[in-house]
């Protein structure tokens, strides 16, 4: 009888804790990215929607690259990450947008550089 009671108690405990877990509100709600947060300019829509098909735009916006390196990045996205190839005027538009708004950061902005290091 004691055994039965403790079994019932255990079952009750499990049921209660399952309910507790289910009732927990989601504590982590990633904020939706909004295209309006990107700098306005030609190519904004094309760039935003092309890149956010796979990942946050934050991953793009945190970079600063020359046009050539953005171009290489697009090639990399296509060859290694499965992005549909972007060519011609569309590619130019996206490259213009990226290199205008996310340009290569000046070396000076990266802090002290060793003047003797091979650049
Ligand atoms: C088909 C999916 C896909 C599309 C579309 C896509 N990417 Fe990516 N991208 C990825 C994946 C996957 C990674 C992570 C690769 C890794 O870190 O190995 C990534 C990572 C990146 C990174 C981070 C590289 C780093 O050094 O951390 C940049 C920058 C980037 N993508 C730029 C772009 C840009 C710009 C576009 C839009 C023109 C774009 N991606 C569209 C799949 C995609």
Image (spheres, helix red, strand yellow):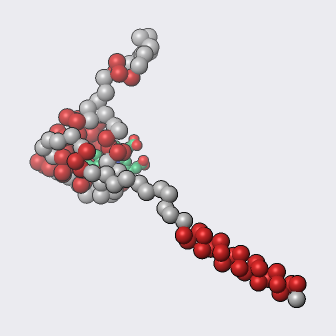
Please report the residue visible at 27 percent of the width from the left and 51 percent of the height from the top. 34
Q: Position of residue 105 (x, y in %)?
A: 31, 27
Q: Left or right: 118 with respect to 43? A: right
Please report the residue visible at 60 percent of the width from the left and 70 percent of the height from the top. 20
Please report the residue visible at 49 percent of the width from the left and 62 percent of the height from the top. 26
Q: Quadrant of the C terminus?
A: top left
Q: Left or right: 16 with respect to 52? A: right
Q: Left or right: 4 with respect to 81? A: right
Q: Quarter-wise, where is residue 96 in the image?
A: top left
Q: Left or right: 45 with respect to 118? A: left
12 or 36: which is nearer to us? 12
For this orientation, the residue located farthest to the right is 2
37 or 101: which is nearer to us? 37
Please report the residue visible at 22 percent of the width from the left and 47 percent of the height from the top. 36
Q: Quarter-wise, where is residue 13 in the image?
A: bottom right
Q: Is residue 10 above or below residue 37?
A: below
For this orientation, the residue located farthest to the bottom is 1
Q: Position of residue 21 (x, y in %)?
A: 59, 68
Q: Position of residue 81 (x, y in %)?
A: 36, 54
């Amino acid at each position: 009888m004691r055994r039965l009671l403790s079994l019932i108690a255990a079952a009750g405990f499990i049921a209660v804790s399952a309910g507790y877990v289910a009732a927990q509100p989601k504590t982590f709600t990633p904020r939706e990215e909004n295209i309006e947060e990107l700098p306005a300019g030609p190519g904004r829509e094309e760039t935003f929607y092309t890149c956010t098909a796979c990942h946050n735009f934050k991953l793009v916006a945190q970079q600063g690259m020359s046009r050539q390196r953005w171009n290489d990045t697009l090639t990399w996205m296509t060859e290694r990450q499965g992005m549909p190839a972007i060519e011609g005027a569309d590619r130019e538009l996206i490259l213009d947008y990226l290199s205008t708004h996310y340009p290569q950061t000046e070396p000076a902005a990266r802090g002290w550089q060793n003047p003797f290091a091979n650049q």
